[in-house]
Amino acid sequence: MSSLSAADERRSTRSHRPQGRGVMACVSARVSAGVSACVGLGVTWLALAAPAQAAGIYSCVDATGKRYTSDRPIAECLDREQRVLNKDGSQRQTLPPRMNAEERALSEERQRLQDQAQAAQKDAVRRDRNLMLRFPDEPSHNKAREAALDDLRRGVALSERRLQDLLDERQPMLAETEFYKGRRLPFKLKSKLEANDAQQQAQRDIIQNQNAETVRINALYDAELARLRRLWAGAAPGSVPPASGAVPARKR
């Protein structure tokens, strides 16, 4: 074929090239048009069609009752919900109203409180499960109570014995003060009496604190036992509310 006839052939092919945008137009084209033209045309069509399919159709009714439809979020309905529809008219999703700064802050606060409540519920479930693993029955719980109170009882008994010793030590000092009625006590005797008084007060304070701790631990175990009894009876972990005025648990 001569160079002139080849050029005429190319011009003829371009003039008769199909104008359709689909792949079918490429199939109907003459083979001499080349495969590359068909591929390029198909890619262009897909690139144009994909965004339209992904965008969806926005629909809403404004405050006056007027209905709007658009291929993008509708400015007249930013203060209300907008439906996003598929091409077949089915609903894909619902866009919530846009919020101002105050509304956004309130929404974030509600979400924060909701997250806290969910975390607290999970923690309550975990604590109840651990409690039931530690105390499968009431005898095991009573045994743990007695073990916790034993140290306190021994501490109180020790302080009471020490207090009695101090009272016994004070008797000779008091007897000696009889020789100094109406006179100033010697410095040494006076110092011994003051030291004895201070030590007695210290032991009394220890006994008072130990007794208060005994009350606290008993209240803790009482509340714990009431909770366990409901769990043993079949209540779901995390479903038992804390007892009113429950004593905060101390790590044991």
Image (cartoon, rainbow, N blue to C red):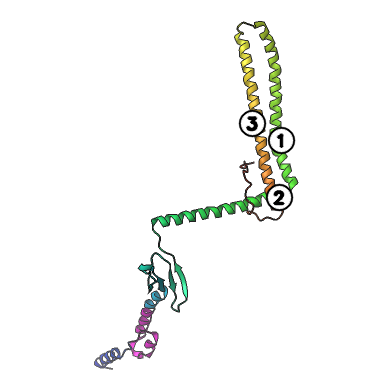
Q: What element carries label 1?
A: helix
Q: How crowded is mark 2: few (under 14 residues within 10 Å), some or many (20 or more)?
A: some
Of residues 204 and 44, the one drawn nearer to the viewer in this rendering: 204
Q: Is mark 2 on a helix, strand or loop?
A: helix
At which x and y percent is residue 125?
Answer: 62, 53
At which x and y percent is residue 60?
Answer: 41, 71
Q: In this view, does 53 lie to the left or right of 221?
A: left
Q: Residues within 10 Å of mark 1 (few under 14, many from 20)?
A: few
Question: Closer to the observer: label 1 or label 2?
Answer: 2
Q: Residues within 10 Å of mark 3 (few under 14, many from 20)?
A: some
Q: Are marks 3 and 1 in contact (CB under 8 Å)?
A: no
The magenta region covers 20-45
**Which residue is the site of mark 1?**
150
> In the picture, residue 206 is in which quadrant?
top right
Q: What residue type is labelled 1?
A: Asp
Sequence-wise, the earlier of marks 1 and 2 is 1
Q: Which residue lies furthest to the right in this view?
A: 139
**Vertical side of 178 occupied by 203: above or below:** below
Judged by its main secondary structure, the magenta piece is helix
Of residues 40 and 238, the one drawn nearer to the viewer in this rendering: 238
**Which residue is the site of mark 3?**
209
**Which residue is the site of mark 2?**
229
Q: Which amino acid does label 2 sit on?
A: Arg
